[in-house]
Amino acid sequence: MLLSALALLVAADPAPKFELKDGDRVVWLGGTLVEREQRYGHWEAALLAAHADKKITFRNLGWSGDTVHGEARGRFDFNNAEKCFKQIVDQTVELKPTVIFVSYGTNESFEGKEGLPKFEKGLEKLLDALKPTNARVVLLSPVRFEKSASLPDPKPANARLALYRDAIKAVAAKRGHAFADAFEHVTPKDDTENGMHLTERGYEATAAQWLAALGVAPPTAPTGKLDALRKAVVAKNEQFFNKWRPQNETYLFGFRKHEQGRNAKEIAEFDPFIAKAEDEIAKLLKELK
């Protein structure tokens, strides 16, 4: 019955077309797919280049292994589900986004059809919690798995992923959010390290497919200029990562802050570096117009 209901919802009203506007502040939530993209910047650079005439900023809050419940990012509160979840929401709201990419479902899919109700409930809860931002939401499906030494037959795993893709699409249609079907459009070909996680070459090879999932035409920028933009994006992502996930956060904000908590004020010192990186991105985009 659940699958029948999902099919009806999916067939009902198509999710609105995705578009970015001048001045948008995009926050990207998700697990490993999202976190690792910030290392390489191919998808973000392609999307920026496709909107070179607009001023748009991206902040990546991806966390490897995460779920809609925030389980991976709980750190010292991993056994407190509400605190784990609250971290996703608080971190997102603080950035004042106008657009939020929500990319979950891969880890949850290992629970199969039995795990769908829990996933749907968690996704709905997350979207409800993010409502106060008034941001436009884009729900992204997981990327399909490919055959590899560690995943000789990806068909069963992809069958489970497809169930979660359909659930995400149904939630998007019900709530009036945009939906990007990465499961359908992004097809790795010997571009993962284990059948699941894209390599740098994987992000590069699938950048145009990622844009197609969003319904965005690929940029026509020369390869050299696009790579310069990508490097600037990676530099910005690194500075932002250092700010929101400092390596010594245990001492700055955690249970040992009584030792070095006074140094937490230095986190704000990353802001000028992030701003400088954004200026470089803006300069490179101007050259692409």
Image: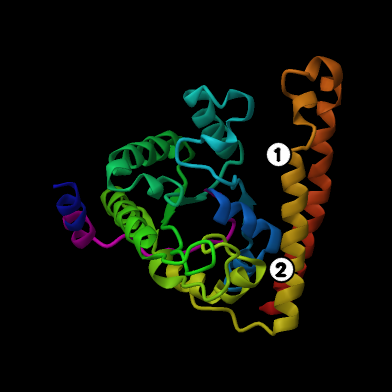
Up/down of 236 relative to 245, above or below:
below
Residue type indicated by callout 2: Arg
Relative side of 191 to 238, left or right: left
**Real-space Cα separation, disc 2 to disc 1, in angstroms:** 21 Å
Residue type indicated by callout 1: Trp
The residue located at (75%, 30%) in the rendering is 249
**Secondary structure found at label 1:** helix
Q: Which mark is residue 1?
A: none
Q: Position of residue 121 (x, y in %)?
A: 32, 37
Label 2 environment density (alpha carbons within 10 Å; few <14, some 14–19, many ≥20): many
Q: Earlier in the sequence, mark 2 or mark 1?
A: 2
Q: Position of residue 225 (x, y in %)?
A: 74, 79
Relative side of 142 to 84, left or right: left
Location of the C terminus (image quadrant): bottom right
Q: Position of residue 39 (x, y in %)?
A: 70, 58
The residue located at (77%, 43%) in the rendering is 242
Q: Using the rendered view, name the quadrant where residue 263 is placed.
A: top right
Taking depth in this image into account, of 1 and 174 the one nearest to the observer is: 1
Residue 208 seen: yes
Span highlighted in magenta in the image: 8-29
The residue located at (59%, 66%) in the rendering is 43
The residue located at (38%, 65%) in the rendering is 17
Query: Circle 1 is placed at which residue position?
Result: 244
Query: Circle 2 is placed at which residue position?
Result: 230
Relative side of 175 to 217, left or right: left
Q: Position of residue 58 (x, y in %)?
A: 62, 55
Is residue 9 covered in magenta?
A: yes
